[in-house]
Image (tube, rainbow, N blue to C red):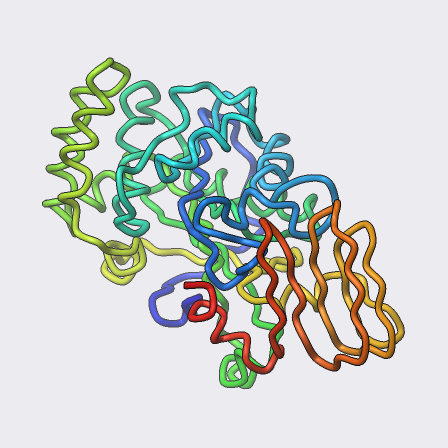
Amino acid sequence: MIALSLYWHFAIRYENIIMIHNDIQIIIMAGGVGSRFWSMSTPDYPKQFIDVMGVGRSLIQLTVDRLKPICPVENMWVVTNEKYIRIVKEQIPDMPVDNILSEPEARNTAPCIAYACWKIQKKHPDANIVVTPSDALVINTSEYQRVLSKALSYTSDKNAIVTIGIKPNRPETAEQHLAAGNNYWNAGIFVWNIDTISKAIRTFQPNLASIMDEMASSFYTEKEKEVVGKLFPTCEKISIDYAVMEKSKDIFTLPAEFGWSDLGSWGSLRTLLPQDEAGNAKVGKDIRLYECKNCVVHAADESKVVVQGLDGYIVAEKHGQLLVCSLKEEQRIKEFGK
């Protein structure tokens, strides 16, 4: 996460915005490998495709569900790694095949977003766009929808890039920002119209724009996969934050509080799950804890897990792999999962 104080310029006031309905398109970024959530999340089946919360829906399905009141699935786009295309089709079966974009290799968020925007622009030249990650959690979905609707109203007829700013509320990760009182987390949710973002990329990342222009001639044809496979890997690895957000003067922040979490660690997941009187959180059909406290246990539905005498531990089982790790050492999980 990046504190928006690094690059935000103006805050948007809710009362000055009226919802305008137009051609809304939504880009869902789903190419991450979720390495911080091993063993539940693996490179072959990362966390965005897993029922992390134990509610019967994966994180990407929950993302689509809460976006449906804003626009239909036919207007949503998923950008993901080529090896996850099958999973996306299985989990979002009503999404048009042309709307599932395959990255030949990961090149960070700027090329990912540019690919989707250039493809959308070819058929939707007046599109108003939301970009969102697939693996975040939102508690208050109605407020989330209200905030995005306000942002879309603002960008529909303005040269503006809107970021959704979340007030930091976890002292262990944001002490200095909490103290300042006027900073927001970048939730990785952006809103803009197609003209604004394409002009910004052309201005600040002309090489990326040139590659996208060359790719665009193949969009919606049988040659698209071949052309994208050849050209996309030549894009510079760069995030949209560094590529555009820190350079543009047309950035606006819309402060929001809708119970957002990037689910970046087992510790953050534990705080979001229901806990027993000993502070334990668990997801799974048959998990039994004895003399345990402050633990998070996550297991496949068919697994029986019995844990005794642990304090402050992660116990995670999936795909025949078991992780037992102190919550204090969870930053090492990437290393353990290699």
Q: Tell which of 320 and 279 is nearer to you.
A: 320
Q: Position of residue 121 (x, y in %)?
A: 29, 26
**Which quadrant of the rendered structure holds the N terminus?**
bottom left
Which of the pair 237/206 is nearer the observer?
A: 237
Direction top: furthest residue: 222
Viewer-proximal residue among 172 and 179: 172
- Would you say 81 lies left or right of 178 here? left
Residue 249 occupies quadrant: bottom left
Work out which quarter of the rendered image holds the C terminus and state it.
bottom left
* Residue drawn where x is 23% and y is 60% of the image: 247
Q: Position of residue 232 (x, y in %)?
A: 19, 38
Q: Residue furthest front?
A: 320
Q: Residue at x 50, y 21 (%)?
A: 74
x, y (%) of residue 271? 70, 68
User: Where residue 311 sits: x, y (%)?
Assistant: 74, 82
The residue positioned 29% from the left and 27% from the top of the image is 119
Would you place residue 80 above or below residue 140 in this image? above
Q: Residue 179, located in which quarter of the rendered image?
A: bottom right
Identify the residue shown where x is 19% and y is 17%. 223
267 versus 284 height, above or below: below
- Residue 268, by quadrant, is bottom right
Task: State left or right for residue 194 relative to residue 52.
Answer: left
Question: Relative to 272, is 233 above or below?
Answer: above
The reply, left or right, for residue 194 in relation to residue 210 is right
